[in-house]
Structure formats: C-alpha cells, structure tokens
Image (cartoon, rainbow, N blue to C red):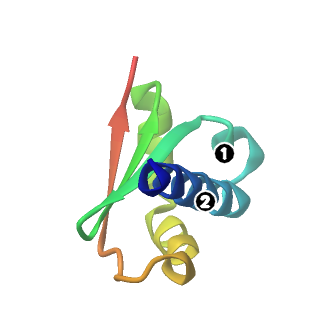
Amino acid sequence: MAYFYSQIEQQQLILQHIRMVLPESLAKQIRHCLIRDKKLLVYTDSAAWASQLRFYNSAILAATAPLTRRPVETLQIKIIA
C-alpha cells in the first residue's frame, strides 16, 4: 500500500510543478498527470485546452525533468470526461 501512496504523492508533485510553469488560466485545466515508461500523460477535460497545452510541450517536459529518475521524452495530452 505504501508503494501506491508514494506514486500518488509523486504524481501530485509533478502536477504542481507543471502548473507552476503554465499561465494560471491554463494551469487550472490540468486535472491529473502521470508518467508511464518515458511518456508523461497529462489529462484535461476539453479538446480546446488540450490544443493550448500542446504549445507548452517543452516547458512541461522541462518542469518534470528534475523530479524523475528516468528522462521523460514525450508528452501526451488526453481528454477525460
């Protein structure tokens, strides 16, 4: 159980760092994020916000770099209902 709590804590920390590098209006639209393999998955709730987030691809990846053991190479933005 401790492993899962540490994963949730890491995801929340990454989410905070991502939100710090984005404009406030855009930062509010990110609902969740997680790292799977070498891919950062960012979840938002509309296609319009997803397209805006893609403009910040390099800034988002740079924000996660100091927080991960393995380098994150790609960003994938997903839409959740």
Q: Quadrant of residue 36?
A: bottom left
Image point 43% across, 38% down: which residue?
Answer: 43
Q: Which secondary structure, mark 1?
A: helix
Please determine whether, in this image, residue 62 is positioned above or below residue 3.
below
Image point 72% across, 52% down: which residue?
Answer: 23
Q: Which residue is mark 2?
A: 18
Q: Which residue is mark 1?
A: 27
On the image, the x and y values in percent for residue 75 come to 34, 60
Task: For label 1, count other residues whose C-alpha is less than 10 Å away and answer few (under 14), some (14-19) or many (20+).
Answer: some
Residue 47 is left or right of residue 18, and the answer is left
On the image, the x and y values in percent for residue 81 come to 40, 16
In primary-sequence order, the first of circles 2 and 1 is: 2
In 3D space, how far apart are the residues under numbered discs 2 and 1 (Cα atoms)? 8 Å
Kind of residue at disc 1: Ala
Q: Quadrant of residue 51?
A: top left
Image point 47% across, 25% down: which residue?
Answer: 45
Residue nearest the viewer, comparing 19 with 10: 10
On the image, the x and y values in percent for residue 62 come to 52, 77
Please determine whether, in this image, residue 45 is positioned above or below residue 13.
above
Image point 44% across, 47% down: which residue?
Answer: 1
On the image, the x and y values in percent for residue 19 come to 67, 54
Residue 40 is left or right of residue 28, and the answer is left
The disc at residue 80 is none
Please determine whether, in this image, residue 44 is positioned above or below residue 74.
above
Looking at the image, how many numbered discs can be counted on the residues? 2
Asked if the residue at tag 1 contacts the one at tag 2, i.e. Cβ–Cβ closer than 8 Å, the answer is: yes
Q: Which secondary structure, mark 2?
A: helix
Please determine whether, in this image, residue 7 is positioned above or below residue 45.
below
Residue 17 is left or right of residue 50, and the answer is right
